[in-house]
Structure formats: C-alpha cells, structure tokens
Amino acid sequence: MLNVGQKVSELRRMTVGELRREYAEVFGEQTRSYHKEFLVRRIAWRIQANAEGGLPERARQRALEIANDADLRTRAPGRANPPCIPMSSATGRVVTARIEVPADARLPMPGALLTREYRGRTIRVRVLPKGFDHEGTVYRSLSAVAHAVTGAHWNGYLFFGLEAPTKSSTEKP
C-alpha cells in the first residue's frame, strides 16, 4: 500500500522538471503548467484518487450530467470581446453585440452643469454624453469627480445631491 502523505512530501522536494515528468507518468499526458504548487496538488490528488478509489460511480455520472448541461469555456472571454447573448437555446446560435446601458435617471441631460459648494469652493461639473468634465479633465463617473475633489471615496450622486426621481415625476400624463 502506497503512503500518500509520504509521496506528497517527496513531491514537495522535487524540481519543476521532475514534477512535470511525474505528472506525465501519473496522468498519461504532458502538462502545460510550470507552477510548482499546482503540479504538486494535481499529482497528489491523482495519487490519492488512485490509492483510495476516487469518486463513486454515481457521483461521477452526476458530474457528467451537470457538465453536459453547462456551457463550458476553456478560457475566460477577453476584455476586448463583446459579451455573448444567446439568441435561441433551441438552435444553439449565439450573437455577439455591445450591450448599451441606459443613462441613470438621476442624471440631467448632457450639457447640464452640476454645482456644489464644498469647503468654501464651488465645484462645477458639466455632464457629457459619456462622462463628466471638471476643470478640463473628463471623468468616467461622478464618484471619480467627487474623489478627485475631496480625496475620499464618495457616492457621486449623493455628493452632488442627485436623488432618484419620484414615481410621480417619471409617470407620463
């Protein structure tokens, strides 16, 4: 019987090259990883699973069922890629498109000027179509403007006194 604890201790003393060879021997395939701790953990897991039998067949079948139902990725989507929106689950087709987020109802229209007195100074911010202009610098959010002015983290809407519109003011006559 193999002592798993002793084998793991031996793994921790191995070099990355030795671990890669051990990985190939235990898993029957090469690894792309050069991360020592990852290799130690994966090899130790496999050795323990081989020694103690791994998952019961029922758990293995259930895992396969779950995996078949899931949309799996081998890599996370990159930042430059637009999000995927499933068009039809029956056809399995996917459409990629930019998702436009509507402007917050608390914001006035682009071109409006927001003002606030802060420590004896008048803070003026012009609302832009995509951002906010404060003293010639364009910020992505009101919170960023508030942080630049105060040096502290603020909710930009609260800092400039913008409240959510009441239900009666948003209803159409």
Image: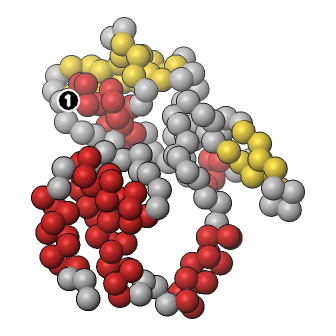
Q: Which residue is mark 1?
A: 150
- In terms of image quadrants, where is residue 40? bottom left
Residue 102 appearing in the image:
no
Residue closest to the eye, 28 or 171: 28
Residue at the far top: name it. 136
- In terms of image quadrants, where is residue 90? bottom right
| Amino acid type, residue under disc 1 in the picture | Thr
Residue 93 appearing in the image:
yes
Residue closest to the eye, 161 or 79: 79
In the drawing, does residue 127 fall left or right of residue 151? right
Above or below, comparing residue 59 to residue 104 in the picture: below
Residue closest to the eye, 116 or 43: 43
| Secondary element type, mark 1 | helix
Residue closest to the eye, 113 or 29: 29
Above or below, comparing residue 157 to residue 42 in the picture: above
- In terms of image quadrants, where is residue 145? top left
In the drawing, does residue 89 fall left or right of residue 37? right
Residue 129 locus on image (x, y percent):
57, 21
* Residue drawn at (37%, 8%) of the image: 136
In the drawing, does residue 85 fall left or right of residue 26? right
